[in-house]
Image (cartoon, rainbow, N blue to C red):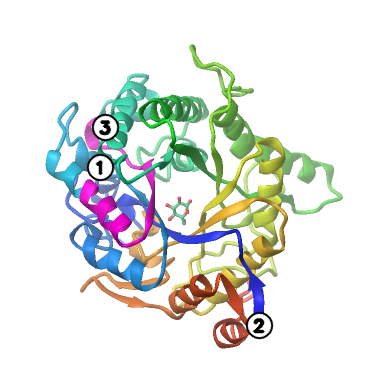
């Protein structure tokens, strides 16, 4: 007996290079860590030590029955200084994807996931128009190297999150607070996505290319308050809809500006959705409702939102949907299985073409400014010893994959006893 049936949706896990690889590199994030900007004082130089443990991690994916793996590329490894390519690093990535395919795991590769090499950050990053050409060259190189094994690509992860955290709120490198800068980075990233889409299809006509967009539900704090309603709608537009439209269609609505040479078109083969939470809004910005279920970072747990965002995305940009990230910060694995179950239940019950689901994250990883203190993994990472231990939620996920759904027995064993924290409790 199945508690839910996931026929039609293939299950995988996701990671990002800077968050798992480790290594003493010169990236925007290694610099940010050196500047003391990480809450727990940790650095991506350690992370999950994946660079040295690729074979072990691939074997673990296979052991868990995972057949889809979203992974990233560290730009600073493959091009440590401008125009200088590190052949050994490229060979390492080739071996990694070849090893995945040999183990029966299909890679989906993200080229840019919040990470810039130091030399490019020095040159102004995405504020510098020359970065587009650098990114074109990176995409060309990576696709040429990896295309014997990879045909699914995400040029850029969550451009809206990167632009706002790095250029509006100043929380991420380079720590700027400028609306003008934010808008120009949003436009540049959409432009870079469109160029990469066209480029990848020239290099590999059968490729499937999409974005991985961070999408949220923005709900007014008080639905009867017109100011709250308007603020929620405006935040929704500015944070996500305008950006998504530009990337998907080449139509740059206000306040973005259409870059010269971009033609309206269809720049996606699938819609990648990263979904985590709902925000409540009373003025432009975001917040969290009270008396709701929350994770260990205080983000509301709102499974219905997964389908709410997929529904509007699909109506606007019909294509197969890949949930390219979904997961939660649960430091003791106390409620991750319930979170998984409730989000997958939304997929099972929906009529949308959700063809993939990638759980974030495979192992505990280095969580940007939260460092090692926020655990999202199905597999526990001991950051000191780099020992991996499959969590209960990881066992549950392996069981879901094996059964292409959740059996009654699995529900009783892993889900039934779990409850979420609520944000009434002092945390
Ligand atoms: C990002 C990941 C991050 C996750 C959890 C997403 O916004 O793509 O890199 O670890 O959220 O915060």
Mark 1, Cα crowd under 10 Å, few <14 / some 14-19 / many 20+, is many
Instruction: Give the residue number, with chain letter if any, for mark 1.
Output: 27
Q: Report the quarter where the N terminus lies.
A: bottom right
Task: Name the mark nearer the viewer: 3 or 1.
Answer: 3
Relative to 108, 44 lies left or right? left
Instruction: Give the residue number, with chain letter if any, for mark 2.
Output: 1
Question: Going 30% across and 42% down the picture, which residue do you hit?
Answer: 148
Instruction: Give the residue number, with chain letter if any, for mark 3.
Output: 141
- Using the image, determine if residue 373 lies above or below residue 71: below
Residue that protrudes farthest toward the right in the picture: 224
Q: Quadrant of residue 420?
A: bottom right
Ligand 1 within 8 angstroms of badge 2 C-beta: no
The image shows residue 137 at horizontal and vertical percentages of 29, 26
The image shows residue 37 at horizontal and vertical percentages of 33, 51
> Would residue 265 be seen by someone viewing this image from the given angle?
yes
- Using the image, determine if residue 164 lies above or below residue 222: above
């Amino acid at each position: 007996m199945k508690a839910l049936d996931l026929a039609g949706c293939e299950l995988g896990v996701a990671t990002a290079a800077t968050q798992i690889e480790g290594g003493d590199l010169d990236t925007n994030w290694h610099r940010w860590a050196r500047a003391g900007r990480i809450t727990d004082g940790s650095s991506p130089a350690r992370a999950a030590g994946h660079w040295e443990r690729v074979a072990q991690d691939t074997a673990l994916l296979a052991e868990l029955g995972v057949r889809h793996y979203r992974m990233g590329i560290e730009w600073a490894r493959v091009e440590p200084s401008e125009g200088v390519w590190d052949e050994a690093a490229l060979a390492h990535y080739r071996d990694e994807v070849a090893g995945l395919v040999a183990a029966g795991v299909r890679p989906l590769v993200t080229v840019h996931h919040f990470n810039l090499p130091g030399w490019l950050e020095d040159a102004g990053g995405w504020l510098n128009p020359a970065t587009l050409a650098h990114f074109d060259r990176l995409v060309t190189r990576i696709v040429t190297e990896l295309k014997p094994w990879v045909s699914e690509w995400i040029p850029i992860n969550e451009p809206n999150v990167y632009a706002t955290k790095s250029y509006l709120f100043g929380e991420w490198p380079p720590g700027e607070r400028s609306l003008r800068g934010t808008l120009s980075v949003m436009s540049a990233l959409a432009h870079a996505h469109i160029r990469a889409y066209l480029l990848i299809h020239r290099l590999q006509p059968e490729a499937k290319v999409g974005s991985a967009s961070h999408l949220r539900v923005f709900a007014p704090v008080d639905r009867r308050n017109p100011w709250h309603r308007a603020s929620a709608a405006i935040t929704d537009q500015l944070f996500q809809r305008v950006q998504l439209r530009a990337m998907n269609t080449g139509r740059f609505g206000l306040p973005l500006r259409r870059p010269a040479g971009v033609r309206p078109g269809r720049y996606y083969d699938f819609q990648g959705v990263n979904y985590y939470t709902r925000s409540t809004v009373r003025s432009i910005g975001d917040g969290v409702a009270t008396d709701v279920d929350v994770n260990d970072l205080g983000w509301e747990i709102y499974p219905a939102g997964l389908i709410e965002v997929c529904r509007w995305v699909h109506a606007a940009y019909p294509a197969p949907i890949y949930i390219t990230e979904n997961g939660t910060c649960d430091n003791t694995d106390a409620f991750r299985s319930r979170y998984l179950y409730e989000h997958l239940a939304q997929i099972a019950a929906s009529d949308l073409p959700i063809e993939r689901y990638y759980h974030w994250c495979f192992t505990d990883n280095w969580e940007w400014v939260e460092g090692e203190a926020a655990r999202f993994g199905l597999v526990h990472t001991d950051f000191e010893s780099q020992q991996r231990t499959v969590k209960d939620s990881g066992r549950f996920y392996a069981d879901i994959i094996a059964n292409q759904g959740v059996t009654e027995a699995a529900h009783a064993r892993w889900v039934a006893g779990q409850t979420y924290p609520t944000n009434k409790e002092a945390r």
